[in-house]
Every structure is written in structure tokens, then in C-alpha cells.
Amino acid sequence: MPVPKSVTKINKHGVTFIDSVDRAEYTLAELSRAALRDAARVLRRIAKENTPVVTGTLKKNIATWVRGRKDHPTPYLQLGVYSQPAAKKKGLTPAYHAHLAEFGSVRSRPANEGRGILRPTVQDNIDLIRRVQAQYLAEVEKEVKAMDLIDEEEEIADD
């Protein structure tokens, strides 16, 4: 998505309307996307650390995706395991047993003491995710304060 114009100015009857909503929406979406990418790196590392290793196939197949939809501009984060075609495309052995490691099976004990791998990674690190998001979104406030300080109009002092 290209960066929209910073402002749209419309002059009507001597009044100038300045619209910077597109720029603000773009900035929020991109900061959210960057924050999700940083959170994804941390979550992926934690998930891989908590993955039981037999052959290492499952650990190699854990991945994250930051996605967005055209109908909803807010990006979102997915933590999961590559599908069989995606794993083969990346040159990995598919992790056919990923669902068993996450949910357990009827014949075996529950996976990871009934907790799985991916769900607890996210649930146990909600505060970390919030902190990462807060760091990025605090940048919006700085930009807003800076824009408040910038006055593009010529000042005429009445002393």
C-alpha cells in the first residue's frame, strides 16, 4: 500500500479544510503491522523453545504470518504450523503430527500436559505482546504532538 498524501486541502468560500485521515489510518496500520512482526519474532522463538523435539520437524515448521484483509485494514497475527504444500515449497518435511502435539489424541495422553504448544505460547505472553504493541503505537502520540507544534500558517502578532 503506497503512502497516501499527507493532507488533502479543499478551499470553499475562503475556508481551507485539511483532511489527513488517510495518512493517519495508514500510519496506524503500518505501526500495528510492525508491532505484530516484532511480537511474532518473540512468539515464534518461545513456541520453538517449548516444542518437544523428537526429529525437529515440528520445530522447523512453526511460523508466523502478519496478514490483513481488504475489507478490514487492521492487520492481525497468526501463529501456526506450515501446511503440507507450504512446507514442501520451503524444502521442509511436513509436520503431519502437529495437531497431535497441540491437541493430543484419543490414545495418548493430552499434548504437553493438556496445554499444547501454540495456545499457551500466546496466552502466557499477552503482557509481552501488549508491551510491544504499546512501544510502536506510542510513536503515533509523538507524531501528533509534533504536528500540533508545527504551524504552517504565517503568524501575525497583535501586540
Image (tube, grey):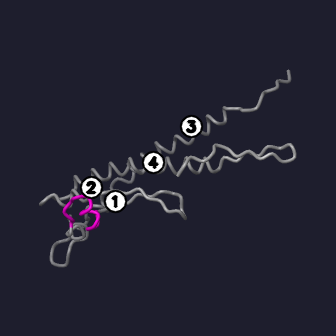
SS for dot 2: helix
* Residue 35 point in image, percent of width and height: 44, 48
Q: Residue at x 33, y 55 (%)?
A: 124
CA separation in Å, label 4 and label 3:
15 Å
In the image, is 94 to the left or to the right of 12? left
What amino acid type is highlighted by mark number 3?
Answer: Lys
Q: Quadrant of residue 149?
A: top right
Q: Specify few, some or many for label 3: CA neighbours under 10 Å numbering under 14, 14-19, or 20 or more.
A: few
What amino acid type is highlighted by mark number 2?
Answer: Ala
According to the image, label 2 marks what residue?
A: 47
Earlier in the chain: of badge 2 and badge 3, it is 2
Identify the mark at residue 152; answer none if there is no mark: none
* Residue 111 point in image, percent of width and height: 21, 67
Residue sitting at the far left: 54
**Cβ atoms under marks 2 and 4 closer than 8 Å:** no
According to the image, label 4 marks what residue?
A: 133
Q: Specify few, some or many for label 1: CA neighbours under 10 Å numbering under 14, 14-19, or 20 or more.
A: some
Q: Residue at x 30, y 57 (%)?
A: 63
SS for dot 3: helix
CA separation in Å, label 1 and label 2:
9 Å
According to the image, label 1 marks what residue?
A: 79
In the image, is 92 to the left or to the right of 122? left
Residue sitting at the far top: 159
Residue sitting at the far right: 13
Earlier in the chain: of badge 2 and badge 4, it is 2
Residue sitting at the far bottom: 106
What amino acid type is highlighted by mark number 4?
Answer: Gln
What amino acid type is highlighted by mark number 1?
Answer: Leu
Earlier in the chain: of badge 4 and badge 3, it is 4
For marks 1 and 2, give the one nearer the viewer.
1
Q: Quick check: 76 above or below 11?
A: below
